[in-house]
Image (cartoon, rainbow, N blue to C red):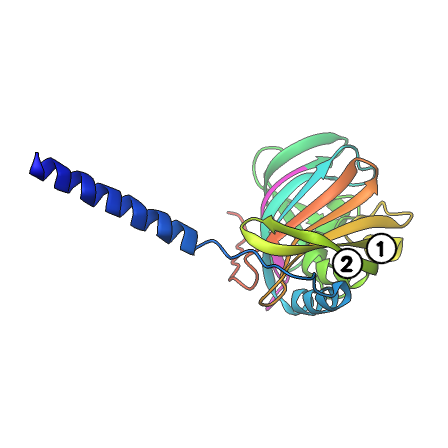
Amino acid sequence: MIARRKILALAAGAALLAGCSNNDHKPPAPTGPLPSAGQLQSESAAYTKAQTSVHVVVTTTGTVPDFPLQKLEGDLANKPQTVATGHISAKMSGQLVEGDFRVLGDGHLWANLFGPWQDFGEAAKALGGYQISDILSPEKGLGNLVAGIQNPTAEGREQVGGVNTVKIKGKVSPEVLKPLYPGAKQEADVTAWVQEDGDHQLVRTVVEVSPGNTIVLDPSKWGEPVTVAKPV
């Protein structure tokens, strides 16, 4: 009986320690007044533009006209070369196709969307004007999108993927949107979730093309190495 009590006590202690350990890994939720939306926007845009690699998930909800992607998940880099690799579901040649893709340093899209790997030529032409590598471009990509949010307002705090963020909202011009959404013809509401502390990393961006119809971009793993080789 004594031995059994000792075992139970040890088990309870281990569970308590495990619980404490799990809680220790959760970032404490910030309190107090929200930080300046303009300052967060500026610092997040600067950080994003300076990055040379990223993991990104692009999804859509509803109907987004003139946008070939249904979903893309992959890794991108722009130094020493502009390359990308991942999995894509997109409209090509009038049909919805899915498979793995790679964008090589020469800008060509390789994919196994219709069976064996094949070279589809310039990625932007193959995807109806959508250039995957523009996501990371300092002049056209996510950093430029965040910088282009007009009259940003901080609307609250949210945890996104375990990260404490501030939700920033505003409008973006079609000129800023076009590299990420070739079908942009008018202003769109854009919401950005920016890490509240640290480097103010961009955690999520939602472009509302029209009510209920959105493009969602979830970047992560900023600055991690990306290696892309030509399929064999």
Which residue is pictured at 78% across the width and 64% down the height? 147
Considering every residue shown, the one lying at the far right of the view is 186
- Can residue 17 be seen here? The reply is yes
x and y, in percent, of residue 36 in the image:
74, 66
Residue 80 on the magenta segment: yes
User: Label 1 belongs to which residue?
Assistant: 172
Q: Work out whether 39 lies above or below 188.
A: below
Labelled pair 2, 1 in contact (Cβ < 8 Å): yes
Considering every residue shown, the one lying at the far top of the view is 95
- The three-letter amino acid code for the residue at tag 1 is Val
User: Label 2 belongs to which residue?
Assistant: 145
Q: Residues within 10 Å of mark 1 (few under 14, many from 20)?
A: many
Nearer to the camera, 147 or 185: 147
Among numbered discs 2 and 1, the one appearing first in the sequence? 2
Nearer to the camera, 47 or 167: 167
SS type, badge 1: strand
x and y, in percent, of residue 201 in the image:
62, 62
Residue 226 on the magenta segment: no
Q: Residues within 10 Å of mark 2 (few under 14, many from 20)?
A: many
Nearer to the camera, 68 or 104: 68
Q: Work out whether 88 lies above or below 124.
A: above
Answer left or right for 222 relative to 67: left
x and y, in percent, of residue 12 in the image:
25, 42
Magenta stretch, residue numbers: 77-89
Q: Main secondary structure of the magenta part?
A: strand
SS type, badge 2: helix
Answer left or right for 150 relative to 199: right
